[in-house]
Amino acid sequence: MKLFNAFLEDESGAVTVDWVVLTAAIVGLGIAVLTSVGNGTTSLADKISESLADANVRTLDGLDSAFGSGNGT
């Protein structure tokens, strides 16, 4: 019976449980934030990709002769 009473009076494990619950709450909050931000960034990345796919790249005449052919020569 003494061992059982000592077990009931010992609160050292309660602190561990508190930290586990707090850590789980922080991880859950982080996952929720990443999910909501991830959806927005995916949408933004799609818009940027579409914009870049439609872009036209113009070349300037004479750059090949001024800077070489672009192959390291």
Image (spheres, rainbow, N blue to C red):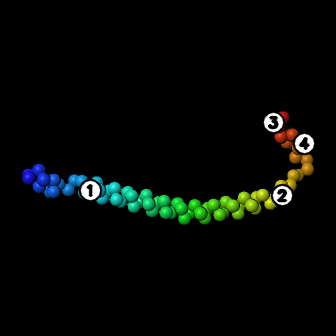
Q: Kindly check if marks 3 and 4 are in contact, taking CB atoms under 8 A apart as contact.
A: no
Q: Nearer the viewer, residue 15 or 8?
A: 8
| Between discs 2 and 4, the one toward the N terminus | 2
| Between discs 3 and 2, the one toward the N terminus | 2
Judged by depth in the image, the label closer to the viewer, 3 or 2, is 2
Judged by depth in the image, the label closer to the viewer, 2 or 1, is 1
Mark 2 and mark 4: Cα distance apart in space: 22 Å
Spot the residue most to the left: 2
Residue 56 shown left or right of residue 35 in the figure: right
Check disc 1 and report the residue beneath it.
Answer: 15
Which amino acid, by three-letter code, is at mark 1?
A: Val
| Between discs 3 and 4, the one toward the N terminus | 4
Residue 53 shown left or right of residue 63 in the figure: left
Q: Kindly check if marks 4 and 1 are in contact, taking CB atoms under 8 A apart as contact.
A: no
Asked which secondary structure carries label 3, the reply is loop
Q: Is residue 67 above or below residue 31?
A: above
Which amino acid, by three-letter code, is at mark 3?
A: Gly
- Tell me where residue 57 appears, x and y as whole percent: 83, 55
Asked which secondary structure carries label 4, the reply is helix
Which amino acid, by three-letter code, is at mark 4?
A: Ser
- Residue found at x 15% / y 57%: 9
Pointer 4: residues within 10 angstroms few (<14), some, or many (20+)? few
Q: Nearer the viewer, residue 1 or 17?
A: 1
Mark 3 and mark 4: Cα distance apart in space: 13 Å
Check disc 3 and report the residue beneath it.
Answer: 72
Q: Kindly check if marks 2 and 4 are in contact, taking CB atoms under 8 A apart as contact.
A: no
Mark 3 and mark 1: Cα distance apart in space: 65 Å
Pointer 2: residues within 10 angstroms few (<14), some, or many (20+)? few
- Tell me where residue 13 appears, x and y as whole percent: 24, 53
Judged by depth in the image, the label closer to the viewer, 3 or 4, is 3
Asked which secondary structure carries label 1, the reply is helix
Check disc 4 and report the residue beneath it.
Answer: 65
